[in-house]
Image (spheres, grey):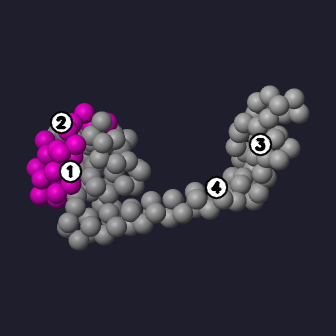
Amino acid sequence: MKKDEVPQDDGSLSKSNLKELIYATDEGGRYTTTLSSGWEPKSIALSQSLDAINERVADALAKVKGGEASVLYYLMELHRMDVPVLAGYAGTWQWRVKRHFKPEVFEKLDDRTIKKYADAFGMSPDALRHFKPE
């Protein structure tokens, strides 16, 4: 795309006075950087992906309130993680993370394991143990 053809559509970036750095070709055909305030198709895709994330967080919250999942599952979704990422941060196996999603198993976790999860979410172990989702 040529530098003078870079889209400047209203989108999520333009609302916050931010610009995205993208690559385009200049008059000589060389790649250079330029700023874009947005591109409508990209804004639509971003909006849809955020809606999907918010839906997953809401589903996780419902499962926690219904006693089907531990707060660990909700916090994972809230922090936009998945099981492999959370397992990596906690330094444990993925199957163990999935097991800790069960409320009865989560309640029995030792302090060392709780600390690993709390560190992954940037909170204190006590805050994690007593976390009440809204």
- Identify the element where label 2 is drawn: helix
Using the numbered discs, state the Cα–Cα distance from disc 4 to disc 1 in whole angstroms: 33 Å
Q: Residue at x 80, y 28 (%)?
A: 30
> Which residue is tagged 4?
42
Quick check: 36 left or right of 131?
Answer: right
Amino acid at pointer 1: Lys
Q: Earlier in the sequence, mark 1 or mark 2?
A: 1
Q: Determine which of the numbered discs, if any, sits on residue 98 in the image.
A: 1
| Residue 99: in magenta span | yes
The percent coordinates of residue 41 (x first, y second) are: 66, 59
* Of 36 and 64, the residue lying toward us: 36
48 and 78: which is toward the camera: 48
Q: Earlier in the sequence, mark 3 or mark 4?
A: 3
Q: Residue at x 32, y 63 (%)?
A: 60
Q: Which residues are magenta?
A: 89-110
Give the amino acid type for the residue marked by disc 2 in the picture.
Answer: Arg
Q: Position of residue 81 (x, y in %)?
A: 37, 48
Residue identifier under label 2: 112
Q: Using residue 101 as the reference point, say whether residue 15 is left or right of it.
A: right
124 falls in the magenta region? no
Q: Nearer the viewer, mark 3 or mark 1?
A: 3
Residue at image position (17%, 44%) is 96
Q: Which one is earlier in the sequence, the residue at label 3 or at label 1?
A: 3
Where in the figure is residue 22, as x and y percent of width and height? Answer: 71, 39
Image point (27%, 40%), residue name: 87
**SS state under label 1:** helix
The residue that label 3 is drawn on is 1
The secondary structure type at the circle numbered 3 is: loop
Nearer mark to the viewer, of 4 and 1: 4
